[in-house]
């Protein structure tokens, strides 16, 4: 009887961000170092959310290695955070994607895809538009591409005026987490110019936008909006799927594999 093939196992990799905080990620080595996917989580989230473990396993079965990690601002994550929680923090998280890529490069892995969910989708898009050496493919899962609308939706239409009057507002989440929303934090996010970033999109990087048709957190029209700015972007809509693709993991898996394997071909 032929013995079963060994299953890939996850290896923990620790690396530093620009603040000296130790970030933690999980590398699932599928036997190839040439086409590695970095998975980036979203707001109030961590590297276990949005079926990331399932996606990593599916990629491994297809022979693609992946690395999912917790940003410093992850909630209930494994990475170190020495600073107060920030809602935006986009510039720092883009830099953390680069730090993850550098850590993988130091271990001999080449990143071919950066994939992000929700806020992570915006971060992945910013990364592709801003870095000197972008990956061949960026994939957004339910990405936020109208950041001002998102702030007003989450915190109320008068939040900017409220923060001008009182630049720090204590908040308590349903999970008991307490933090302070600041004017500076909000301004960083609402001032992200997606249209300007789109004009800088590198010709050699493909963009795939995957979105659920029943997403009530970030409507699918935001993917349509970015796709209109970048006509060569590919949009994939999953009927019935919500923001986290809760009951549509198989469809999400199929869409991600199609995008990634197409880039690796």
Image (cartoon, grey):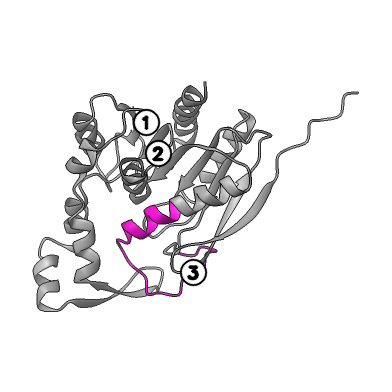
Q: Position of residue 242 (x, y in %)?
A: 35, 41
Mark 3 vs 2: CB contact within 8 A: no
Q: Determine whether the residue tagged by mark 1 lies in a helix, strand or loop.
A: loop
Of the 4 image quadrants, the one containing the N terminus is top right
Decide if residue 48 is in sight here: no
Counting the numbered discs, the total is 3
Q: Is residue 241 magenta?
A: no
Q: Position of residue 58 (x, y in %)?
A: 58, 34
Q: Is residue 78 magenta?
A: yes
Query: Residue 131's image quarter?
Result: top left
In the image, 87: left or right of 264?
left
Mark 2 vs 1: CB contact within 8 A: yes
> Given the current orientation, which residue lies at the most extreme front position?
132
Q: First in sequence: mark 2 or mark 1?
A: 2
The region drawn magenta spans 75-97
Residue under label 1, please give it. 205
Q: First in sequence: mark 3 or mark 2?
A: 3
Whole-number angstrom distance, CA of label 1 to CA of label 3: 30 Å
Q: Residues within 10 Å of mark 2 (few under 14, many from 20)?
A: many
Q: Which mark is residue 20?
A: 3
Q: Which mark is residue 134?
A: 2
């Amino acid at each position: 009887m032929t013995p079963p093939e060994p299953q890939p196992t996850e290896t923990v990799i620790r690396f530093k961000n620009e603040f000296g905080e130790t970030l933690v990620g999980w590398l699932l080595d599928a036997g190839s170092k040439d086409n590695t996917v970095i998975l980036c989580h979203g707001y109030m989230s961590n590297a276990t959310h949005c079926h990331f473990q399932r996606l990593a396993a599916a990629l491994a079965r297809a022979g693609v290695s992946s690395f999912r990690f917790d940003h410093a601002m992850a909630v209930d994550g494994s990475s170190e955070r020495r600073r107060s929680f920030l809602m935006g923090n986009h510039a720092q998280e883009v830099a953390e994607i680069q730090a993850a890529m550098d850590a993988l490069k130091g271990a001999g892995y080449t990143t071919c895809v950066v994939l992000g969910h929700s806020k992570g989708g915006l971060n992945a898009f910013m990364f592709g538009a801003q870095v000197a050496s972008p990956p061949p493919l960026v994939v957004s899962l339910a990405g936020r591409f109208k950041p001002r609308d998102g702030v007003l939706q989450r915190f109320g239409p008068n939040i900017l005026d409220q923060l001008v009057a009182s630049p720090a507002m204590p908040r308590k989440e349903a999970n008991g987490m307490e933090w302070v929303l600041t004017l500076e934090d909000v301004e960083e996010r609402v001032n992200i110019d997606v249209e300007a970033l789109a004009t800088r999109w590198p010709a050699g990087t493909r963009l795939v936008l995957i979105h659920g048709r029943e997403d009530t957190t970030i409507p699918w029209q935001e993917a349509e909006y970015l796709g209109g700015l970048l006509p060569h972007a590919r949009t994939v809509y999953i009927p019935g799927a919500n923001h986290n693709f809760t009951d549509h993991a198989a469809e999400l898996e199929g869409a991600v594999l199609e995008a990634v394997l197409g880039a690796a071909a």
